[in-house]
Image (cartoon, rainbow, N blue to C red):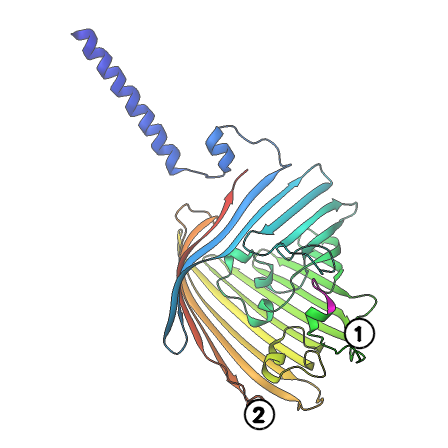
């Protein structure tokens, strides 16, 4: 009897020990570990292969002149692999799993589902290069964030081509200042599709593709004691033969303990309407998108981490669409003003930034000038309430 009782007590003690260990393990699930390490209990000892799954999903209630629709939506789903093969050679690959893989007609023979696919090389004296498909080195703090962190982009960024193929040359001035010179293809798709070119068989094209359809960007990233950060850029893009786009972006970020904010300014001057917003208002011109258009955008966001696992934020957007030089039926001046506003709360249950739950409210309002109304167009205000999650899962 004593032996049986002793055995039962020992077994109960072992079960309690195992339960305590499992409980502690569950409380620290994926803390500074990948899913592979968690499942195999084998610590990864090298940095040659890292695999992530980037997700943002939510239930959205959409409003347009009242309640319009409610549905679940996976806005972002991207697989990402990157690593350092040695002290001078690295690679990175990222692809969207919820976008078409059709690359037919694309200038770089890659589908737009692929964001990044290339290799990086560290050179001497602070120089580095990255060759392949990559994110454009445009300025702006929001532009540089992981897309899963963005609940609503400005019209400027939403309608830009942000991932293109080419070469980036970087130079670290010091540990806190960096310059980048980037040369990329100026588009993903065909010339006709990008600029809405439509010509009858017996008509000569009113615009022709240039022989070097490239975009050149000079970028400066600055860090001042981790309190104030900058991301500024200037770009020139060959849109077509003798047609150019000039783009300037100035991103500024402020970090003060629990408080963080950024303020981005962007301006795009386009010989041919690349964003398509003005073309949507005024219509095509001579078989292609509208001409001589300008876009201005100002975006700001304020975060307050009032508790270690809780963050509250507000965001505002102000944007204009104009014609900077009269042409054909289009007078010069402003045609549209757009406002965006957003507020929300985020909860980080694991204490880090990999997983967080959110609840947000987003609104967009538009005002058309008399110049725009002359084209018999109208714009509806919209709204959205969202509840969802953001998770960058470290798979390996």
User: Which residue is label 1 attached to?
Assistant: 208
User: Which residue is label 2 attached to?
Assistant: 374
Magenta region, residue range: 187-191
Quarter of the figure with residue 304: bottom left
Horizontal side of residue 396 vs 291, given as left or right: left
Residue neighbourhood size for the residue with mark 1, other residues' Cα within 10 Å, grouped as few (<14), some (14–19), many (≥20): some
Q: Can residue 359 be seen in this view?
A: no
* 83 in magenta: no
Looking at the picture, tell me which residue is in the foreground, 115 or 183. Answer: 115
**Residue drawn at point x = 69 percent, y = 77 percent:** 269
**Residue drawn at point x = 75 percent, y = 53 percent:** 171
Give the Cα separation between the discs numbered 1 and 2. Answer: 30 Å
**Residue drawn at point x = 49 percent, y = 29 percent:** 40
Residue sticking out furthest to the left: 1
Q: Residue 92 at x, y = what percent?
A: 66, 46
Q: Quadrant of the N terminus?
A: top left
Q: Residue 235 at x, y = what percent?
A: 73, 68
Horizontal side of residue 173 vs 99, given as left or right: right
Q: Residue 308 at x, y = what percent?
A: 40, 51
Residue neighbourhood size for the residue with mark 2, other residues' Cα within 10 Å, grouped as few (<14), some (14–19), many (≥20): few
Say which label, 1 or 2, has the lower sequence index.
1
Q: Is the magenta stretch mostly helix, strand or loop?
A: loop
């Amino acid at each position: 009897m004593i032996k049986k009782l002793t055995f039962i007590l020992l077994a109960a003690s072992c079960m309690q020990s195992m339960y305590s260990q499992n409980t502690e393990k569950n409380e620290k699930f994926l803390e500074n570990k990948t899913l592979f390490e968690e499942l195999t209990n084998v610590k990864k000892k090298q940095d040659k292969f890292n695999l992530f799954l980037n997700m943002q999903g939510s239930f959205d209630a959409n409003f347009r002149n009242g309640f319009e629709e409610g549905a679940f939506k996976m806005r972002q789903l991207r697989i990402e692999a990157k690593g350092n093969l040695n002290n001078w050679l690295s690679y990175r690959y990222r692809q969207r799993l919820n976008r078409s893989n059709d690359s037919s007609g694309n200038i770089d023979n890659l589908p737009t589902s692929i964001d990044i696919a290339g290799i990086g090389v560290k050179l001497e004296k602070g120089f580095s290069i990255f060759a392949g498909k990559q994110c454009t080195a445009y300025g702006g703090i929001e532009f540089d964030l992981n897309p899963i962190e963005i609940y609503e982009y400005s019209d400027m960024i939403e309608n830009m081509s942000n991932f293109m193929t080419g070469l980036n040359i970087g130079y670290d001035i010091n540990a806190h200042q960096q310059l980048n010179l980037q040369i990329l293809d100026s588009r993903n798709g065909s010339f006709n599709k990008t600029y809405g070119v439509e010509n009858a068989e017996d008509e000569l094209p009113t615009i022709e593709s240039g022989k070097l359809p490239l975009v050149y960007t000079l970028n400066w990233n600055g860090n001042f004691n981790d309190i104030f950060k900058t991301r500024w850029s200037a770009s020139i893009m060959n849109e077509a033969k003798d047609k150019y786009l000039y783009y300037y972006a100035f991103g500024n970020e402020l970090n003060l303990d629990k408080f963080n904010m950024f303020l981005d300014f962007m301006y795009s001057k386009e010989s041919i309407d690349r964003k398509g917003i003005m073309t949507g208002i005024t219509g095509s011109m001579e078989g292609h998108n509208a001409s001589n258009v300008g876009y201005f955008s100002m975006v700001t966001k304020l975060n307050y981490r009032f508790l270690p696992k809780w963050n509250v934020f507000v965001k505002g957007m102000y944007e204009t669409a104009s014609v900077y030089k009269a042409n054909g039926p289009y007078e010069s001046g402003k045609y549209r003003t757009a406002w965006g506003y957003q507020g929300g709360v985020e909860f980080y249950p694991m204490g880090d930034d990999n997983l967080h739950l959110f609840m947000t409210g987003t609104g967009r309002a538009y005002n058309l000038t008399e110049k725009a109304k002359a084209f018999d167009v109208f714009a509806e205000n919209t709204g959205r309430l969202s509840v969802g999650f953001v998770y960058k899962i470290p798979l390996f």
